[in-house]
Image (tube, rainbow, N blue to C red):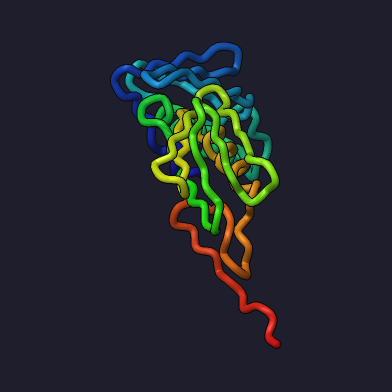
């Protein structure tokens, strides 16, 4: 059994939830998130907490309980991330390493010079904001954990770190193991 199911998801003040037609909606000060719920789990709750449980009606064999508990643990984490997102939000930081590589903010767009013939422009999706504290770093903020991570991965894909020189875009604190180049 998933150990997460032993605990409820606590709702802070100002956060509300509603369950309608297998869709849970969580509203908070930063925004509103929705998640479709599979019939493998049951979700119950009140104004202060949400409980995620396995759907005991679907258990035929003893091994089904373990499989359903995995799904319930996954939905527990998804709903918990929704609650954290609408209250605190999520942040991903990227570092840009390389001579001549730099980034700047132009309105809401991100303008990156990455050694291509033209600068790369990235428009933020709805719910995402960019910050550029210096020309070699980008901060991505939003209330949807999946969307923040996906936008960061899409930006990183423009210049994956090179293992010989270490140049490229990486997450803050990420270490890139460099290889020794050719020997003459």
Report whether 80 appears left or right of 72. Answer: left
Report whether 27 appears left or right of 179. Answer: left
Residue with the most extreme top position: 20
Q: Residue at x 54, y 64 (%)?
A: 176
Using the image, determine if residue 169 lies above or below residue 90. below
Residue 118 in sight in this render: yes
Relative depth, front residue between 161 and 81 = 161
Report whether 141 appears left or right of 57. Answer: left
Relative depth, front residue between 12 and 155 = 155
Q: Position of residue 40 (x, y in %)?
A: 62, 29
Q: Residue at x 63, y 26 (%)?
A: 38
What quarter of the picture does the C terminus occupy? bottom right
Residue 88 position by quadrant: top left
Residue with the most extreme bottom position: 184
Q: Residue at x 62, y 78 (%)?
A: 180
Residue 81 in sight in this render: no
Report whether 1 appears left or right of 60. Answer: left
Using the image, determine if residue 102 lies above or below residue 167. above
Image label count: 0
Q: Position of residue 92 (x, y in %)?
A: 46, 42
Q: Which residue is drawn at 52% across and 52% down?
A: 96
């Amino acid at each position: 059994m998933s150990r997460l199911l032993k605990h409820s998801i606590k709702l802070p003040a100002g956060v509300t939830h509603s369950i309608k037609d297998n869709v849970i909606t969580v509203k908070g000060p930063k925004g509103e998130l929705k998640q479709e719920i599979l019939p493998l789990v049951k979700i119950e709750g009140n104004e202060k907490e949400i409980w995620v449980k396995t759907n005991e009606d679907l258990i035929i064999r003893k091994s089904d309980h373990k499989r359903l508990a995995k799904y319930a643990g996954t939905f527990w984490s998804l709903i918990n991330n929704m609650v954290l997102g609408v209250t605190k939000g999520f942040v991903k930081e990227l570092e840009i390493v390389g001579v001549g590589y730099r980034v700047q903010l132009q309105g809401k767009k991100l303008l990156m010079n990455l050694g291509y013939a033209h600068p790369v422009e990235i428009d933020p999706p709805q719910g995402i904001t960019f910050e550029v504290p210096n020309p070699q770093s980008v901060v991505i903020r939003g209330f949807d954990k999946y969307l923040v991570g996906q936008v960061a991965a899409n930006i990183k894909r423009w210049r994956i770190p090179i293992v010989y020189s270490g140049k490229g875009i990486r997450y803050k604190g990420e270490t890139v193991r460099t290889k020794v180049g050719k020997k003459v």
